[in-house]
Image (spheres, helix red, strand yellow):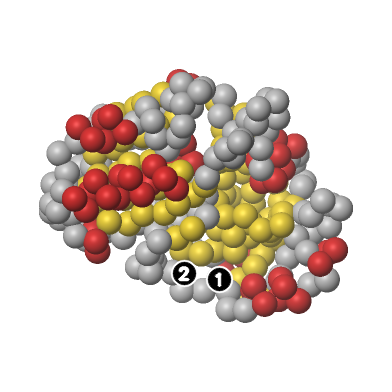
Amino acid sequence: MAETLMSDRWVTPRRAQVETVSVLRAESISSGFRRVTVGNDDPRFAEHFSYLGYDQWLRLFLPNSAGILEPPYGDLDGWYSRWLATEESRRCVIRNYTIRDAREVGAGWELDIDFVLHNGPGGEVEGIAARWAQAARPGDRIGVLDQGRFFTADDHDGPIMIIADETGLPGVEGIARSLAGRPATYLLEVPHSDDRRDLFTDDVTWSVRDPHQMPGAALLPAVRALAFDSTAYVYVVGEASFMLTVRNLAKAAGVPKNKIDFCAYWRPVRNA
């Protein structure tokens, strides 16, 4: 998931256009996550999509409240203008999500997208995309548009520090897989103990948030105790205020701005 990008260094796709994919599978994988696998076996899809690994992300075009799905078909350039030009009652919903994993299948691709299920005060699932994922069934269709990836430490030869809450976890899993064993330190917060997952490395600190804690509250003590190396690359994503706090800690420790990639994925609903 990606809501507000705070860097202009991300890796953009060589080519991309709005495509339609179908739900192949949908399953709840833990208390806080539902995984939806989508695919398209049309060779034309493969012509316009390349898996870059790491935290590659997509624009998702979801049916609107009337069940209408009319993605702004066409190239990457101009998609937003095409979306705005669609009659308002027929405009689809746009959300941004990272790809947890991708596989070439036949002439096309399968993409795993993990949706965080945050519950509101009454226990209901919050968010249009999360509710769509909860109800998704094989054969349902959505639009997708490749946006590239945000992680930029491919050639960094110093320490790598990756800090995220649950919303960043699917992308972090992609990063860990793409790093293929390269040393990195992971500090991660989740709302449920069963939301933890195998990240192909032993250098992971997990913090489980109490239901009444604000995002980041469980992880911040570990972050504050962390000795930020000024030669490190720091990647931090998640709830906006948590992300900014970690970014400021890294800057105060001497990590250069151009070695900090950060992204605000969400803000919790705060009731007055």
Is disc 1 placed on a helix, strand or loop?
loop
Name the residue: 24% across, 46% down. Answer: 249
Residue 193 position (above or below residue 43): above
Q: Is residue 196 left or right of residue 120?
A: left
Residue 13 position (above or below residue 78): above
Give how far across and how far down residue 201 sits, in percent.
28, 34
Name the residue: 29% across, 37% down. Answer: 186
Residue 198 visible in the current orientation = no
Q: Quadrant of residue 83?
A: bottom right
Question: How much space separates mark 2 and mark 1, taking CA atoms?
Answer: 6 Å
- Residue tagged by mark 2? 13
Name the residue: 37% across, 27% down. Answer: 218
Name the residue: 49% across, 58% down. Answer: 4
Residue 253 position (above or below residue 126): below
| Viewer-nearest residue: 207 or 240 | 240
Residue 250 visible in the current orientation = yes
Q: Is residue 189 left or right of residue 61?
A: left
| Viewer-nearest residue: 245 or 150 | 245
| Neighbour tally class for label 1: few under 14, some 14-19, many 20 plus, Cα within 10 Å | many
Q: Is residue 269 left or right of residue 253?
A: right
Q: Quadrant of residue 164?
A: top left
Is disc 2 placed on a helix, strand or loop?
loop
- Give residue 204's mark: none
Give how far across and how far down residue 199 sits, in percent.
36, 35
Whether tag 2 and tag 1 are in contact, CB under 8 A, the answer is yes
- Residue tagged by mark 1? 16
